Image (tube, helix red, strand yellow):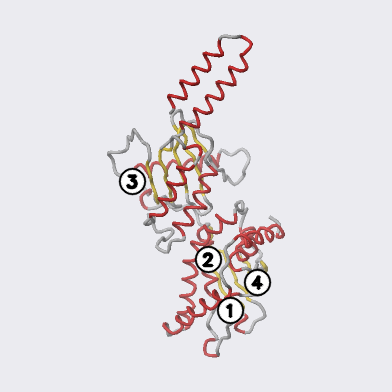
């Protein structure tokens, strides 16, 4: 699927989804992060919790996406990346991302997000400079991909809140999962 | 309803069998009668929803006069169905004369007494609906059940944990599913 048609699909999906007030969304998220920072002593733990929350969102969000976007199955990891960036990000966050920096084996890519709606009113104080404020996005991508059989690791490489020019999420494919039947189907 | 439609079809055929020139009309009348018999008699038998790992997330039975698996281990029925679907997917993939990576998508299976309609999502959820033999493909309806009812009522329910095994299916899912199936044109006389 060409990038332009993915873009169009993204615009259509965005037009169709019910909208919530952007400020409310950003402020709610901010309140949640602040709560986590107060509850957990280590910033690394906060980052982990954010990622876990994202994971729980992602495993559900993927079915919502597949149901609402109505796109045909992707033919491989590269197409999946384009669809995530142009259609899914656009549909759920309102802004499409760019897929860049593919590695030579085509198993890792970066998602570049110019605008991050989660961090709209945020400034990170100096003592929280290791906080991955939008780490929830990493979890969402990880959870969603896991449900379509890609086990990935997603990290925040660049964060505008920490002084970089752009937000960059690095997605690295660890394993393509095969059908894993439940306990009841294993031969005793 | 089926008996009445069949009787009407027989009566229509008798009326037209007299005159030779009305042969085409006889064929048409028989076809029309058959079509209405079909629409009237499509019954929904039961439905399964499986997760990717084969756990039966949901099973509902509306009409199953004969259940040869009734006495045994309660999960056996679902396991047999899933096992068959799993093997079917593998075999259909390997037998594919066109698609190289073997991703064939079986839609309907028919026997003389029932038809099984299948839909598998990209997340591995399988929707299986057994209905009367003559029913047209209910694939679009299964997609709608997934997108409009399952995603809305089950997946978005915070108590549902995908991948964990049989979840607590919220009541409003059952209610909506029932209402949707009853509202389908193919199932009008089927409940």
How many neighbours does mark 4 have within 10 angstroms: few (below 14), some (14-19), or many (20 or more)?
A: many
- Give the number of the mark in front: 1 or 4: 1
Query: The C terminus of chain B lies in which quarter of the figure?
Result: top left
- Whichever of labels 2 and 1 marks the residue nearer the N terminus, that label is 1
Please give the residue where the numbered disc 1 appears in the rendered image.
A119
- Label 3 – label 1 distance at C-alpha: 48 Å
User: Taking A173 as reference, is B4 left or right?
Assistant: left
Question: Residue A55 at what x, y percent from top left?
Answer: 48, 67
Q: Are marks 3 and 1 on the same chain?
A: no
- Label 4 – label 2 distance at C-alpha: 16 Å
Please give the residue where the numbered disc 4 appears in the rendered image.
A112
Question: Residue B74 at what x, y percent from top left?
Answer: 31, 44
Task: Using the image as rendered, state which of residue B82 and residue A92 is in the foreground.
Answer: A92
Residue A1: quarter of image: bottom right
The chain containing the residue under callout 2 comes to A
- Give the number of the mark in front: 3 or 1: 1
Residue drawn at the location 49% of the way across and 49% of the way down = B145
Query: The N terminus of chain B lies in which quarter of the figure?
Result: top left
What SS does tag 3 mark? loop
Please give the residue where the numbered disc 3 appears in the rendered image.
B75
Q: Which mark is residue A148?
A: none
User: Taking B94 as reference, is B43 left or right?
Assistant: left
Asked if A104 appears above or below B113 in the picture, the reply is below
Asked if A181 appears above or below B104 in the picture, the reply is below
Q: Are marks 2 and 1 on the same chain?
A: yes
The chain containing the residue under callout 4 comes to A
Q: Which mark is residue A142?
A: 2
Asked if A47 appears above or below B135 in the picture, the reply is below
- Whichever of labels 4 and 2 marks the residue nearer the N terminus, that label is 4
Task: Using the image as rendered, state which of residue A32 and residue B84 is in the foreground.
Answer: A32
The chain containing the residue under callout 1 comes to A
């Amino acid at each position: 699927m060409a990038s332009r048609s993915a873009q169009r699909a993204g615009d259509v999906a965005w037009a169709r989804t019910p909208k919530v007030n952007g400020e409310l969304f950003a402020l709610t998220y901010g309140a949640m992060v602040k709560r986590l920072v107060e509850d957990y002593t280590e910033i690394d733990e906060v980052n982990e919790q954010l990622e876990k929350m994202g994971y729980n969102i992602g495993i559900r969000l993927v079915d919502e996406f597949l149901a609402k976007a109505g796109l045909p199955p992707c033919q491989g990891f590269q197409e999946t990346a384009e669809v995530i960036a142009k259609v899914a990000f656009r549909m759920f966050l309102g802004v499409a991302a760019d897929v860049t920096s593919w590695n030579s084996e085509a198993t890792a890519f970066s998602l570049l997000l110019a605008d991050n709606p989660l961090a709209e009113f945020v400034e990170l104080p100096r003592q929280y400079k290791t906080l991955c404020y939008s780490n929830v996005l990493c979890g969402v991508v990880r959870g969603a991909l896991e449900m379509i059989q890609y086990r990935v690791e997603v990290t925040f490489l660049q964060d505008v809140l920490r002084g970089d020019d752009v937000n960059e999420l690095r997605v690295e494919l660890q394993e393509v999962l095969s059908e894993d039947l439940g306990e009841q189907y294993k031969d005793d | 309803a089926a008996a009445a439609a069949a009787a009407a079809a027989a009566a229509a055929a008798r009326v037209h069998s007299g005159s030779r020139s009305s042969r085409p009309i006889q064929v048409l009348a028989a076809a029309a009668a058959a079509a209405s018999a079909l629409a009237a008699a499509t019954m929904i038998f039961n439905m399964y929803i499986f997760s990717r790992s084969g756990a039966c997330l949901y099973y509902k039975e509306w009409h199953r006069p004969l259940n040869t698996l009734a006495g045994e281990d309660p999960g056996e029925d679902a396991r047999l169905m899933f096992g068959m679907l799993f093997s079917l997917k593998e075999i259909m993939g390997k037998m594919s004369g066109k698609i190289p990576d073997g991703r064939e998508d079986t839609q309907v299976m028919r026997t003389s007494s029932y038809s099984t309609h299948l839909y598998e999502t990209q997340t591995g959820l399988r929707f299986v609906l057994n209905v009367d033999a003559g029913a047209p493909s209910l694939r679009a309806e299964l997609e709608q059940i997934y997108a409009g009812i399952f995603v809305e009522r089950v997946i978005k329910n915070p108590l549902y944990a995908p991948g964990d095994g049989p979840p607590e299916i919220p009541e409003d899912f059952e209610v909506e599913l029932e209402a949707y199936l009853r509202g389908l044109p193919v199932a009008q006389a089927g409940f």
